[in-house]
Amino acid sequence: MATDLAFGSVPPYYREVYNIISPTSSNVSKELFTKLLVKSGLPSQTLSSIWELIDTKQGSLSRSNLYKALALVAWAQQGKQPSAKLLENFSGEELPRPELGDLSDLAPERTTSLTQLGLRYPDICQFDTIEVDLVPEKKGLFLKHVEYQVSSKRFGTLVRRRYNDFVALHELLLVRFPYRLIPKLPPKKMVGADSHFIEERRKSLRRWLTLVARHPALSGDPLLSFFLTYSGADVQHKIREIFRRVPDEFTTSELAARAKELVPPETHSEFANSRDQIRVILNGVSRLKQIADVLALRSHGYAADMAELGSQLTSLANEPHGSSNWATGGNSVWADMKKGFHIISKEFSLLSNKALQQAVREEDEVCERLNLLLDILVAHRELCERHEKGVSQDHNKALAKMLSLKKRQMQGVIRGTDAESVEQLETKMMEQESVIANVELRNAFSLHCLHLETQLVHAHLEILAAVLGTLVAVQIRGHSEMADVWQLIQPTVAKCLPDKNLQHPVNGTTPSSEK
């Protein structure tokens, strides 16, 4: 969402640039700013002019000064001479966007600490952008299942998937990454799935796949890349066939042998404290989501009420009975009012549309983002429960896979080339046989993963701050738009209805317009 400066509205791209070159929300160094200017491709003389217009006396740039620089670069690329007056005289709604190309090489190096995630939410969003859309039903065909069109910005792919394909991926991810955040899938409703349920499940699948594709550990695994790129038929069976023997993360990780070194002595107490903290946050966010849902429902109800109000005025305007002199005694007020109702009813239709747009914004920009945060918080709760159950079950499974692999090697079983990625993991597993046999190392590795996953949850908490800002903006916009419509309705009512009716007090109360 765009924010406002004194000289104009800042487009989201400006914040993206700031997050890339200053992920810790600090000032931007002169060195990075210089590299950024060079990316614009402008002549050195023009870059010098922009440099002089921006205050860099402190040795670094503030966020607002960076935004000013981006605006000046954009104007310079349009052929305008950079000057302070360009900013002062700017009267447009949104500042122009500069063309800077690929900025990935400007991002500061991520911390190399093995016990720190070193990522903020904007960094996580850079991993991938996922879209999940319904495949339109072909006219005249009755389909027993729903198909989804799944796109990945990272892979540049567009594939079709069914719900059971997601189920297969979910099951395999739990086997491959038992100590990572794996969100829950939405339920499969076999009978009576209406359009509302189908749409809600589509949104839930998009959130689920987004969290998986943006997970630092899961995003680079062959299992996920197969799901997002494979274009053949029968995905759920194919993915199970290839990855059913996939070993879990511990058995192939290069960090497994050093796992005890990666667990700080205070881990157990910190784990208990952070688990309680995230439980409290989960409860709070759940309540916020309930309130946001009520806001959206209220807007839907308001839209329906205004539409009904307009409809009833139309019905009154079309009332078929004539107004005889016998009934009215010569009073023409009702006939005059009926003429006005026709015009006024259209205004209420506009009001209903504005309220409906408000409801959609509340659902998409507030409720849906709170749902994403809830998904990751619930996934953390379930991860803690899996850890509490102990690693002995996982340990026995890993040993069973090791024995099975040895038997297959002795029997000379040869697999097809489709399973090359699994074979590479199994090779790593054989190299680490002694490590795998150590259940203490597995427990330490589980705690190490839990440590990083807790940090990942905290990185996602930035969503809440953005949601609250969006909520305020959505409410301001919605109420402002509806107030504007009411302002339009007021003179229409005064014009189309008999004036004398507006002058009569009700119960001795003077109309507000006369006060």
Image (cartoon, rainbow, N blue to C red):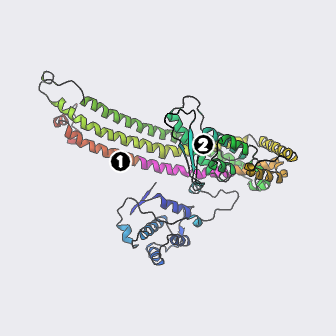
Q: Does the magenta stretch include residue 374?
A: no
Q: Residue 82, image x and y in percent?
A: 41, 72
Q: Residue 204, image x and y in percent?
A: 56, 41
Q: Is residue 301 above or below residue 448?
A: above
Residue positioned 26% across, 38% down in the render: 344
User: Does residue 256 appear to the left or right of 158 in the view shown?
Assistant: right
User: Residue tagged by mark 2?
Assistant: 161
Q: Does the magenta stretch include residue 461?
A: yes
Residue positioned 69% across, 43% down in the render: 238
Residue positioned 40% across, 71% down in the render: 79
User: Does residue 87 appear to the left or right of 193 in the view shown?
Assistant: left
Residue 480 - label: 1
- Can residue 176 be seen here? The reply is yes
Q: Which of marks 2 and 1 is nearer the N terminus?
A: 2
Q: Residue 454, image x and y in percent?
A: 65, 50
Q: Pick out the residue farthest to the bottom.
A: 45
Amino acid under disc 2: Arg
Amino acid under disc 1: Ser
Mark 2 burial class by Cα count in 10 Å: few <14, some 14-19, many 20+: many
Real-space CA distance between mark 2 and mark 1, rounded to the nearest whole angstrom: 42 Å
Residue span colored magenta: 450-474
